[in-house]
Structure formats: structure tokens, C-alpha cells
Image (spheres, rainbow, N blue to C red):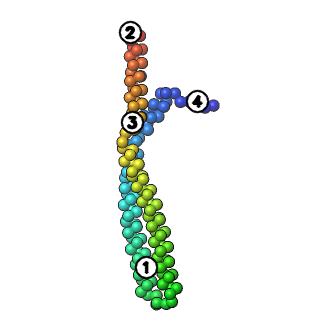
Amino acid sequence: MFQAPTDGQVIEQVRRQERWRPRIAGVFIVVGLAGLAFTIVMGHHIYNTMLGSLNWAYQHIPPGPHQSCQLFNEVGYKRGFLIGMTLLGGFTTFFSMAFNGFLMTIRDRKNQLLLRCWDVLTMEDANSVDEQGA
């Protein structure tokens, strides 16, 4: 039914992970930094567009009762809140992606120690087999 992996299979899986680690870290860093830049540029663009549309509305809609000013304020507040939350989500996502990429560039000490110990043990086993056979 379910067989536990052998020590050799576990070691090969760790070796595969360690081989791909720098490439994946590079992708995370590039995508994270590009996403951060895109989020900042789009946030600036959306802010300017929203500010321009609200200024246009203030200038072209005739002043009316107190309710229209309150309506403009509510629209501005709701738009700003939603855009801010969206940008915060994008910033958080891309920052954490870039940060995890930087963390992945640091070698995993536990995996490196495991691979070194395995190599030493397999070399000792190979040497003992050679000595017994000779």
C-alpha cells in the first residue's frame, strides 16, 4: 500500500530541491520586484486618474445642496479606500514574494549538512567494501 521512501530516495529528493533552489529564488526575486514596481506605478496612475475625475466633477457639476458635497466626499472616500486596499494587497504579495526569493538564496543549512553526512557515509561504506574485497 504505502511504502516509506528509502534513505537514498530521500537524499535524491533533497538534491533535486537544492539544484532548483537558486533558479526558483531568482524567479521569485524578479517577479516580486517587477510586481512591486508595477504596483507602485499603477497606484500613482490610479491616484492621479481618481483625483482628476473628482476635480472635474467638482468643477462641472453646479454647487447644490449640502447633500451633493457629502456625496462627493463619500465617493472619494470609498474610491480611495478600495484602491488603497487593492494596492496594499498587491504590495504585500509582491514584497513577500521578493523577500522569500532573497531568503531562498541563502543555503538551507540542514539540507547541506544532510547531504555532506550522506556523502561521507557512502564514501566510508564504499571504502570499507573496497578494503574487504581486496
Residue shown at the point (48%, 84%) measured from the top left: 69
Distance from disc 1 to disc 2, alpha carbons, whole Å, reads 88 Å
- Pick whichever of labels 3 and 4 is earlier in the sequence: 4
Type of the residue with mark 4: Gln
Name the foreground residue: 92 vs 36.
92
Label 4 sits on residue:
3
The circle drawn on residue 53 is: 1
Q: Give the secondary structure at mark 2.
A: loop
Q: Residue pushed farthest top?
A: 134
Instruction: Write down the quadrant of residue 47 in the picture.
Output: bottom left
Label 3 sits on residue:
109
Query: Quadrant of the image for the N terminus?
Result: top right
Distance from disc 4 to disc 1, alpha carbons, whole Å, reads 65 Å
Q: Please tell me how crowded label 4 is: few (under 14), some (14-19), or many (20+) other residues with Cα within 10 Å.
A: few
Residue shown at the point (42%, 60%) measured from the top left: 91
The circle drawn on residue 134 is: 2
Expressed as whole percent of the image width and height from the top left, the position of residue 111 reads 42, 34
Instruction: Write down the quadrant of residue 15 in the picture.
Output: top left
Q: Please tell me how crowded label 3 is: few (under 14), some (14-19), or many (20+) other residues with Cα within 10 Å.
A: few
- Number of numbered discs on residues: 4
